[in-house]
Image (spheres, rainbow, N blue to C red):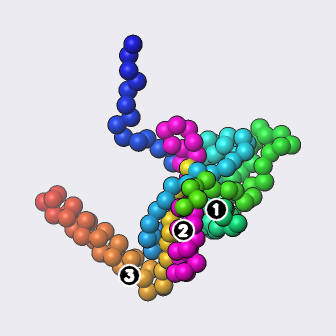
Amino acid sequence: MAAKPALSAKVFKTITENRRARHEYHILETHEAGIALTGTEVKSLRAGRANLQDSFARVENGEMMLYNMHISPYEQGNRFNHEPKRTRRLLMHKQEILRLYGKVREKGLALIPLKVYFNPRGRVKVELALAQGKKSYDKRQDIAARDAKREMDRALRERQKI
């Protein structure tokens, strides 16, 4: 009997990413959470029709909830199609939820979703970041550093051509 091939590297199919989050926030730590979805939401995610812009997570009554994540209605869905911006429950261990709740309440941090993806077993996961908002001068410094790096790379490529 042949053995199943082992997954050497985890292969994730990214559905959507929140690129603005890394520009707007200092990412302190990341966590993985499952998400409770309906059937039409999963089908819409498989088609890549989701948006994380302006979404955030919050702890309410001991449960982690995700707000403002837009999942477009499934095109072949019938009258049981889902509400696009409904509040969705995130699935995490109770100790993890309480630890994050303590950090958010105490230090004034935010829980921001960075990306939504399918794990190798076909489950939908959300990568949450414990983040602190950047000031405008932090953003300017990041832009200046990125421009300087781009200029150095360009100069290096020009030098290698000669």
What is the crowding at mark 2: few (fewer than 14 residues within 10 Å), some, or many (at least 20)? many
The residue sitting at 31% across, 68% down in the picture is 150
Q: Position of residue 70 (x, y in %)?
A: 68, 57
The residue sitting at 44% across, 80% down in the picture is 139
Picture layout, residue 98 above or below residue 14? below
What is the crowding at mark 1: few (fewer than 14 residues within 10 Å), some, or many (at least 20)? many
Q: CA distance from mark 3 to mark 1?
A: 33 Å
Which residue is disc 2 drawn over? 100
- Which label belongs to residue 141? 3
Q: CA distance from mark 1 to mark 2?
A: 10 Å
Which residue is disc 1 drawn over? 64
Any part of residue 111 in sight: no
Q: Position of residue 20 (x, y in %)?
A: 52, 68
Q: Amino acid at mark 2?
A: Leu
Q: Quadrant of residue 3?
A: top left
Going by the image, does 34 lie left or right of 65?
left
The residue sitting at 75% across, 48% down in the picture is 73
- Mark 1 and mark 2 residues within 8 Å of each other at the beta carbon: yes
Where does the magenta region start and end? 96-124
Q: Position of residue 16 (x, y in %)?
A: 56, 53
Q: Amino acid at mark 3?
A: Gln
Quadrant that contains the N terminus: top left
Q: Which residue is outermost to the front?
A: 95
